[in-house]
């Protein structure tokens, strides 16, 4: 299992455009082979900062998505809306307390 978090800081006036694009594609992303979970988070204090939290079967599945036409089209529409370069990282869960 691979956890992927991408932090994105958008130009404030571009947030509605980002949300429209995300909502139009969220089911396609979530149903992409290897994607097990997808969430969108909004920063509590900075309404133009969002994080995607996704769980993938492994790095191969994530890379297949990143090489797909779906990712390329979503990312092309998203990256032009940024106020800053996004921060992305992959992790694995070590401990979970319920």
Image (cartoon, rainbow, N blue to C red):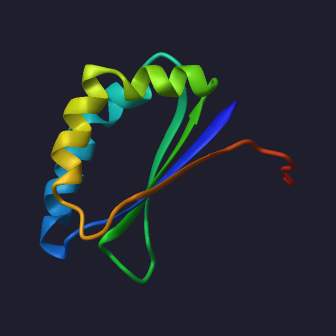
Q: Where is residue 75 shown, x and y percent of the image? A: 26, 41
Q: Which image quadrant is residue 71 in?
A: top left
Farthest bottom residue? 45
- Asked if 24 appears above or below 20 in the picture, the reply is above
Q: Which image quadrant is residue 59 in?
A: top right
Residue at (63% x, 24% y) in the render = 57
Q: Nearer the viewer, residue 92 or 15?
A: 92
Q: Where is residue 54 shown, x and y percent of the image? A: 53, 41
Q: Nearer the viewer, residue 43 or 8?
A: 8
Q: Where is residue 65 shown, x and y percent of the image? A: 41, 24
Say if residue 91 shows up in the picture: yes
Say if residue 31 shows up in the picture: no
Farthest top residue? 33
Q: Is residue 13 left or right of residue 87?
A: left
Q: Nearer the viewer, residue 78 or 84?
A: 84
Residue at (24% x, 63% y) in the render = 82
- Asked if 29 appears above or below 80 in the picture, the reply is above
Q: Nearer the viewer, residue 51 or 90?
A: 90
- Asked if 8 appears above or below 2 in the picture, the reply is below
Residue at (51% x, 28% y) in the render = 62
- Asked if 96 appears above or below 46 in the picture, the reply is above
Q: Quadrant of the N terminus?
A: top right
Farthest front residue? 85
Q: Where is residue 28 shown, x and y percent of the image? A: 32, 26
Q: Is residue 38 left or right of residue 28?
A: right
Residue at (84% x, 50% y) in the render = 96
Q: How many marks?
A: 0
């Amino acid at each position: 299992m691979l956890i992927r978090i991408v932090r994105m800081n958008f130009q404030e006036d571009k947030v509605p455009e980002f949300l429209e694009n995300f909502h139009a594609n969220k089911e396609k992303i979530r149903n992409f082979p290897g994607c097990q979970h997808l969430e969108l988070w909004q920063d509590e204090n900075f309404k133009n900062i969002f994080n995607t939290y996704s769980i993938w079967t492994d790095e191969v599945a994530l890379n297949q998505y990143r090489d797909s036409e779906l990712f390329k089209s979503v990312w092309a529409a998203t990256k032009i809306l940024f106020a800053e370069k996004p921060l992305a990282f992959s992790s694995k869960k070590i401990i979970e307390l319920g």
